[in-house]
Amino acid sequence: MKRYLPLFTTIAFIAFLALGIWSGEVPVVWNKAITVCLSCIGIG
Amino acid sequence: MERLRRRSQYIFALLANAYWLFPWRSPIYQGPLKKLCFPGLNCHSCPAATMSCPLGALQNLLATLRPGLQMGQLHIGAYVLGSLGLIGSVAGRMPCGWICPFGLLQKWLFLLPVPKLSFWRPLRRGPYLFLVVFVVLLPLLVVDPLGYGSTWFCKYVCPAGTLEAGIPLLCLDQGLRRAAGWLFAYKFIVLILLLIWCTLTSRPFCRAICPLGAIYGLFNRVSWLRLRFHPDRCVQCEACLTACPTDVSFYNGLDDLNSAACIRCLRCYTICPSNAISLEFGPVREDIGKEDVEQFYPKANC
């Protein structure tokens, strides 16, 4: 079983990635990334 | 190999920060590439940044989880974790050694000719602490009356944000300069202290703080790409330990060669004079454990 852990892990995270895309997380990530993050720069 | 790694670090640092129109156009890049998570630590509020910071994106998704659920949105960070997990499952912590711009900065700083300090090994647990507390629990649990949390790691810890975003944006924007107060001063002091630490110790941020490295490190033992130690070939010259930027001491059984601390820079693999380290890509083979190492070196300092 341990032998195939890389395969299981890859499949599991591809499924996770697909879930994130399907649930609409990509536009949320994009919206946050295109605005200046005040927390990151130490203002708010 | 070392030259290839150096080139890779420079190329990825440039690719991650390739938007040089910021003085004339918008203060930060707003194109479609920001839908992608960069595999290393690179603040997406840096004026030149072309991709999202995975830690910032993950914290933002967790901080808005409650209001999102109330609106019927299931944003649990699956996109970010899926992206990181996919890379980790293939190469483990290799992005830390080959891609991360902040890792490159630490490498440069450590080259400065100042006295060096060894790293206190218990601090190796630090990245997991920062991952669990600052990246996951605090953004999820400490919320305002409307249910919105905050990005705690970015706000109170992340030196990349201060260096790559805070300082340049404050230089460019007078309004932001006026708004900067105690929080910026605190973050600036954290940055300076960390930069000083980087000159004294090899990669202290990777080893004691970085939550991104903690996530990748979880995959080191189960990734497709792994290192394999052959104790029967080892001559105990310690060339691997001397070359290792994170002091992974595997030849004497103190660490596993694929321990989470290894950033997969492959310097040990390159430098070993007796070919006692090999690279594997594929299903996991039975690991050589501490007992096997002790069998070859019964007097090893374990």
Image (spheres, coloured by chain):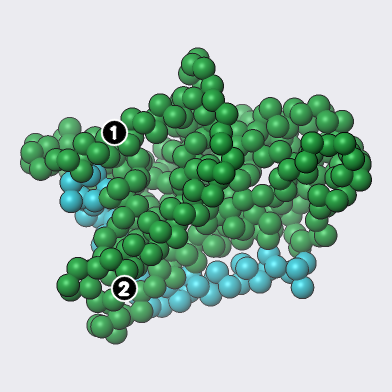
Q: Nearer the viewer, residue B226 or B286?
A: B286
Q: Position of residue B248 (x, y in %)?
A: 67, 39
Q: Position of residue A22 (x, y in %)?
A: 41, 78
Q: Nearer the viewer, residue B270 or B152?
A: B152
Which chain is indicated by disc 1? B
- Badge 1: how crowded within 10 Å, few (<14), some, or many (20+)? some
Q: Is residue A28 left or right of residue A18?
A: left
**How many numbered markers are drawn?**
2
- Badge 2: how crowded within 10 Å, few (<14), some, or many (20+)? many
Q: Quadrant of the C terminus of chain B?
A: top right
Of badges 2 and 1, the one in the foreground is 1
- Kind of residue at badge 2: Leu
User: Is mark 2 in CB contact (under 8 Å) with mark 1?
Assistant: no
Q: Position of residue B70 (x, y in %)?
A: 26, 83
Q: Quadrant of the N terminus of chain B?
A: top right
Which residue has dot 2 on it?
Answer: B65
Give the residue at x 81% y 60%. Answer: B285
Tell me if residue B87 can be seen.
Answer: yes
- Kind of residue at badge 1: Ile
Tell me if residue B36 can be seen.
Answer: no
Q: Nearer the viewer, residue B140 or B59?
A: B140
Give the residue at x 59% y 58%. Answer: B218
Q: Is residue B267 above or below residue B123?
A: above
Label ID, residue B189 = 1
Chain ID, green in image: B
Q: Position of residue B179 (x, y in %)?
A: 10, 43
Local secondary structure at mark 2: helix
Real-space Cα separation, disc 2 to disc 1, in angstroms = 31 Å
Chain ID, cyan in image: A
- Mark nearer the N terminus (2 vs 1): 2
